[in-house]
Each structure stands twice: as C-alpha cells, then as structure tokens.
C-alpha cells in the first residue's frame, strides 16, 4: 500500500504559477503540486520570515483567497498569486494580469464589440489550457463560445474546423443538460406545491401562522438591512440568483464559490429574501460546486491513468493473427 501511495505522489502533476509580494511588481515563476508546497516555496523565494506566518495565497486579479486544494488544481497554468504575510491585506494593482478566470465586473462596464471579442478569447484560452474546465464555465461563457464563428475559434485554439465543430457541439450538450436539470427541478417544485395545496391541514396551518411569519419576516428584514453592506457579489450574479430558476446551474464555479462564502443575512438583505430561502440557495450552490470539482478531478485522474498505461515500458505489442482463407 505504501508503494502505491509513493507512486501516486510522484506522478502528481506540477502546476506552473507566478508569485509576488503585495505592492510589488517583481514576479517569480514556480511549480507546485499542491497549495502547501506553493506556500512553502513562496516563503523561501519571497524571503518571508517565519514570524510572519501564516502566509495566505490570493489571486492577483481580484484577491480571492485560495485555501482549497481542489480549487487550486482547477486553476489554469501560470495563474498569478499574491503571497500575504500575517495581517497583510490584498490591494488591487493595475499590473495584475490575473488568471484565466474572467473578471465579470469588467464586462458589466464594457459591453462594446471589442470587450465581447476579448471575452471569448479569454474563455477559449482557458479551454486550451485544460478542456475539463468546460464543467466549470457559466452558461453565459458556454453560449459565448457556441456563438463564435467556427473558423475564428479554430484559429484561436490552433485546431481544425472539424475538431472545433465537435467542441462546440459538446458545449451545446453541456448547456442543454443544465437546462434539462433546471426544468426537472422546476417540475419537482411544482409537484410539491400541488401536494401542499391539496392538504387541507397544511392550508389551515398556513393561515394560523400567517401573522406570526409576517412579523418574523419584518424582524429578519430589519436585521438584514444592517448587514447588507457586506455583500461583494456583482450585480449580474445577484440578478441571476434572484431571477433565474435553479441559479446554481447558470453561474460559473468561481461565482458559486463566492455565493457560498457570503453571509446568509447580508445576502438575504441584498436579494430581499428571507434567511431560510437564502441558505437553501447557498446549499444548492455548494452542492453544484462540489459536483463540478469532482467531475474535473475524475477526468484528470482518468487522463493520468491513460497516460501511465500508454507509457509503460517492456510491453511487447500483441502479434497479429494470420488471416485465415475460407475453406
């Protein structure tokens, strides 16, 4: 068992990353297989004193804290990180190129043709780094790549038009699967609502507790207004949460993680919801994020197994059988 564990550790892929200190433009290229290794190398290369531990790694683009190994493995190669020593806070710098994650705020501000063209190219480069990131894209990003002319996308990905046409068909299938999941969830909710209406006992209980629930909603709303300033989500994400059915299927994995990290009361105030409904949506986002990350990990495990099998030495090819002539 120990030999197998050592073999898996040795074959674990290294991810190239870029590191720098806060308020510094000097970058260092490193490669690490996990977050702990990246933190250790950051302390050594950036000369961070051990007394300033713990060191926090954040995305240079927007300051997102990266503290999960699965999320780290899903990031593209050459992602830029800022190493923050104890009590340091991330500060935005115009020199930050960031990662292949697309900052949604930039597209809320700039809706020109050049901005739209830049967006699909960024998403295409993310796919070029790792095709399994299809699972992590939002519905909007999927639709952007589907709408791009096949010849333009083929040129960006350095692939043939036939290959890119197959890729766009796959993107459409992923989009259709999310829509089917959304419709199934809506049908289930309608069915449950019909059962509640048919139960006379439930309807009487609702009438008797109507005044009490109204009072509680008013108290919750008053409390939530005090904490609404803590919401850091973009307007587009809030709109998707409020208006789209099964919003967790519409958001990218990065947006899903941000939703799960929000304070339920602050998010409820921003959406004009009650806290219970907000927590339910956050739980759905958490489950969807976990499902996508698990799919990415499974794809990468299968890929590494296939690579190892194809590179095993000392396996002679099977001899071809002689073709028998019919009697």
Image (cartoon, rainbow, N blue to C red):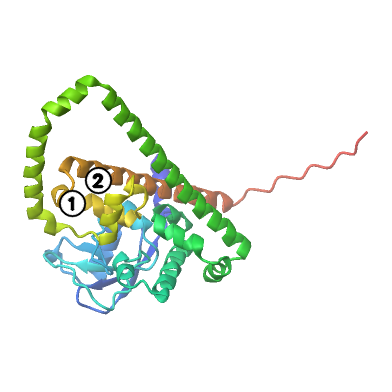
Q: Can you give x and y, in whole percent of width and height, for residue 245 in the image?
A: 33, 45
Q: Nearer the viewer, residue 171 or 89?
A: 171
Near mark 2 (Cα within 10 A), the count class, few <14, some 14-19 or many ≥20, is many
Q: Nearer the viewer, residue 36 or 280?
A: 280
Position of 164 with respect to 81 (left or right) is right
Q: Quadrant of residue 230?
A: bottom left
Q: Which residue shows up at 11% across the image and 35% down it?
A: 213
Q: Of label 1 and label 2, which has the lower sequence position?
A: 1
Q: Is residue 286 above or below residue 184?
A: below
- Percent across and percent down for residue 7 are 43, 49
Q: Nearer the viewer, residue 10 or 16?
A: 16
| Foreground: disc 1 or disc 2 | 1
Callout 2: SS: helix
State the image coordinates of residue 283 (x, y, percent, origin top left): 26, 42
- Which disc, if any, is residue 267? 1
Drawn side of residue 185 relative to residue 299, left or right: left
Q: Quadrant of the C terminus?
A: top right
Q: Residue at x 30, y 76 (%)?
A: 27
Which of the pair 258/109 is nearer the observer? 109
Residue 137 seen by the camera: no
- How many angstroms separate mark 1 from mark 2 (CA)? 10 Å
Image mark for residue 325: none
**Within 10 Å of the Cα at label 1, are there few (<14), some (14-19), or many (20+) other Cα atoms?**
many
With respect to residue 78, does 183 lie above or below?
above
Numbered tag placed on residue 282 in the rendering: 2
Residue 131 visible to the viewer:
yes
Residue at image position (57%, 54%) is 311
- Dot 1 lies on which element? helix
Locate the N terminus by quadrant: top left
**Contact, mark 1 vs mark 2 (Cβ under 8 Å):** yes
Q: Position of residue 125 (x, y in %)?
A: 45, 67
């Amino acid at each position: 068992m120990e030999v197998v564990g050592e073999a898996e550790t040795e074959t674990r892929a290294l991810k190239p990353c870029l590191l720098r200190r806060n308020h510094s433009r000097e970058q260092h290229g490193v490669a690490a297989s996990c977050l702990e290794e990246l933190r250790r190398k950051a302390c050594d290369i950036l000369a961070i004193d051990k007394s300033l531990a713990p060191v926090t790694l954040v995305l240079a683009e927007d300051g997102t804290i990266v503290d999960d190994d699965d999320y780290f493995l899903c990031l593209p190669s050459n992602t830029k990180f800022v190493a923050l020593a104890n009590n340091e806070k991330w500060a935005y710098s115009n020199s930050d190129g960031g990662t292949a994650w697309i900052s949604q705020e930039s597209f809320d501000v700039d809706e020109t043709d050049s901005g739209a063209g830049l967006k699909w190219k960024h998403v295409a480069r993310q796919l070029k780094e790792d095709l399994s990131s299809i699972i992590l894209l939002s519905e909007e990003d999927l639709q952007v790549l589907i709408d791009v002319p096949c010849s333009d996308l083929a040129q960006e990905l350095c692939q043939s038009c036939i290959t890119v046409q197959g890729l766009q068909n796959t993107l459409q299938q992923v989009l259709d699967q999310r829509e089917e999941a959304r419709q199934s969830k809506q049908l289930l909710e309608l069915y449950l609502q019909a059962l509640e209406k048919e139960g006379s006992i439930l309807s009487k209980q609702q009438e008797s507790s109507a005044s009490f629930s109204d009072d509680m909603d008013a108290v919750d709303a008053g409390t939530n207004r005090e904490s609404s300033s803590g919401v850091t989500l973009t307007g587009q994400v809030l709109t998707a949460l409020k208006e789209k059915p099964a919003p967790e299927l519409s958001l990218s994995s990065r947006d899903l993680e941000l939703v799960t990290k929000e304070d339920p009361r602050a998010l409820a105030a921003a959406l004009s919801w009650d806290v219970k409904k907000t927590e339910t949506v956050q739980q759905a986002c958490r489950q969807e994020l976990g499902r996508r990350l698990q799919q990415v990990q499974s794809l990468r495990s299968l890929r590494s197994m296939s690579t190892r099998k194809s590179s095993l030495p000392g396996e002679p090819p099977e001899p071809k059988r002689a073709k028998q002539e019919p009697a």
